Amino acid sequence: MMSTLNTINNNPLKLNTNIAIHTKSVRTLTTKWCRIRCSASSKRREYNITLLPGDGIGPEVISVAKKVLTLAGSQQGIEFQFKEMPVGGAALDLVGVPLPDETLSVAKHSHAVLLGAIGGYKWDNNEKHLKPETGLLQLRAGLGVFANLRPATVLPQLVDSSTLKKEVAEGVDLMVVRELTGGIYFGHPRGFSTNENGEEIGFNTEVYATYEIDRIARIAFETARKRRGKLCSVDKANVLEASMLWRKRVTMMASDYPDVELTHMYVDNAAMQLIRDPKQFDTIVTNNIFGDILSDEASMLTGSIGMLPSASLGESGPGLFEPIHGSAPDIAGQDKANPLATVLSVAMLLRYGLHEENAARIIESAVLETLNKGFRTGDIFSAGKKDLKLEILMSRVRVKTIQEPASSSLTSVKA
Ligand SMILES: NC(=O)c1ccc[n+]([C@@H]2O[C@H](COP(=O)([O-])OP(=O)(O)OC[C@H]3O[C@@H](n4cnc5c(N)ncnc54)[C@H](O)[C@@H]3O)[C@@H](O)[C@H]2O)c1
C-alpha cells in the first residue's frame, strides 16, 4: 500500500482518479494511512497568502481559487490569512507602477503568493517600464523564484480536447522545468542602437552563469527522480555558447543522480518531438526562453491553456503560483474563464509551497470529479458535455471538496 501511496504522491492527478474507484479494502487502508499521517500533523496550521488578482480574468479565477483554498484548508486544520495586493495593469491604474514596493514587500513576507494574470489592451502601448508584464518579471526576480515547474498532463476526461490524435495525446504526463530569472529575458547588454549602415537595431543577450545552471539542474534532477526518472535537457548547444555551458554543467551533475536517465535534445527537435511523440518525455529542463515556448506548446497537448497550473520556486522564501494563461482580455468579465488552472495552481501551492499534501490532493480530486460529472467551460467544451458557468463550477468544486474521497482522510482528521 505504501508504494501505491508513494506513486500517488509522484503522480497525483492521475492516481487520484484511481482513489475514486478503489475497492473498499483499499479505501480502508488509505484511511488507516491518512489517520497515521493526519494525527502526526493534526496541529492547527496558519499561513499568510498574498493574493495578486491582476487584470482581465485574473480577479475572476482568483476569487474561485481563494474559496477552494479556504475550504480545503478548513478540512485539514489549516487557516489562511489573505492579503490582496495590486500588480500589473491594476497597479498601474492605482499607483502608476506595475509592481508597487508594498506589493513586493507583502509578497516576500508571506508563506506563498497566488497570482491571477496581468496585462490587457489598455496598457499595450505603454513604455516598457510601465507595462504590466514588466511588473511580473520584477515580481519573479524580486522573489528570487528561478525554477518554474509546469506540468502538462492529458487527463483521460479531456483527451478529446487535444488537437492531437487521441492515440498521440492519450497518457501524456510531463513536467517542464524552466529557468525563470536568467537568460535572454534578463541579460545585458540589451537595447536599441544603430549599426554601421545607420540602420536601427534591437539586441539582447543570452547569458548563463554556472550557479544559475547548477541550481535549476538540481531541481530538475530531483523532480525527475520523484517522477519516472527520465530527464531531457533541452538546449541549442550546436550554435550557442550559453547552451554549450548549459549542457556541460547538466552533464556534470548527472553523476550525482545515477538513478535518473539524462538525455539532451536541441530545442528545434524538442519542439517537433513534443508534437510527434510527447509520451517519450517525463521531465524536461531548459532555459528561460526555450521553456517559455515549449511549455506553451506542451500546454496545447492537453487541450486548453485554461487547465494548466505552474509553480515558481526559489532557494528560500515564498513560491509564486499561477496559471500559465494570461489575462484573456477577449473573455474577461463574461463569466467564461476556466478557473481550473488557478485551482490546480492552488494544489501546487499546497504541495510545493506549504507541504500540505493532503489538502493538495483534496483539491485535485475535486477537479477530477467535476470533470467526471461532465461539466465543462467553453475552452474545453465538447459535444455531449454540460455547459459550465463559473458559478456552477464553483459549487461543484465546493461540494466535491467537502465530500471528496480523500474524505477518508477528512473523517480521520475529525475523529
Ligand atoms: N502570466 C501572465 O500573467 C501572462 C501570461 C501570458 C500573457 N499575459 C498577458 O495576457 C494578455 C493576453 O495575452 P494572450 O491573449 O496572448 O494570452 P492569454 O493566455 O491571455 O489568452 C490566449 C487565449 O486563451 C484563452 N484563455 C486563456 N485563459 C483562459 C481561461 N482560463 N479560460 C478560457 N480561455 C482562456 C483566451 O480567451 C485567448 O483566446 C497580454 O496582455 C499578455 O501580455 C500574461
Image: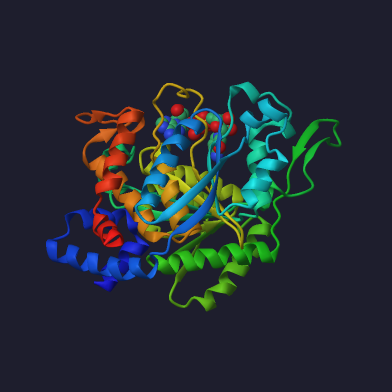
Foreground of the two, 403 or 139 = 403
Residue 319 appears at what percent x and percent y? 56, 54
Residue at image position (45%, 41%) is 66
Image quadrant in which you'd find residue 303: top left
The number of discs equals: 0
Is residue 162 rendered to the left or right of residue 78? Answer: left
- Residue 293: x and y, percent? 53, 44
Which residue is at 22% across, 36% downward? 374
User: The C terminus is located in which quarter?
Assistant: bottom left
Q: Position of residue 63 (x, y in %)?
A: 45, 35
Question: What's the residue at 37%, 49% (across, down)?
Answer: 72
Q: Residue 109, position in %: x, y?
A: 63, 52
Q: Is residue 379 above or below residue 6?
A: above
Instruction: Give 140 or 229, whichever is nearer the viewer.
Output: 140
- Horizontal side of residue 317 vs 170, given as left or right: right
In the picture as drawn, the residue positioned furthest to the left comes out as 24
Look at the image and tell me whether residue 368 can be seen. no
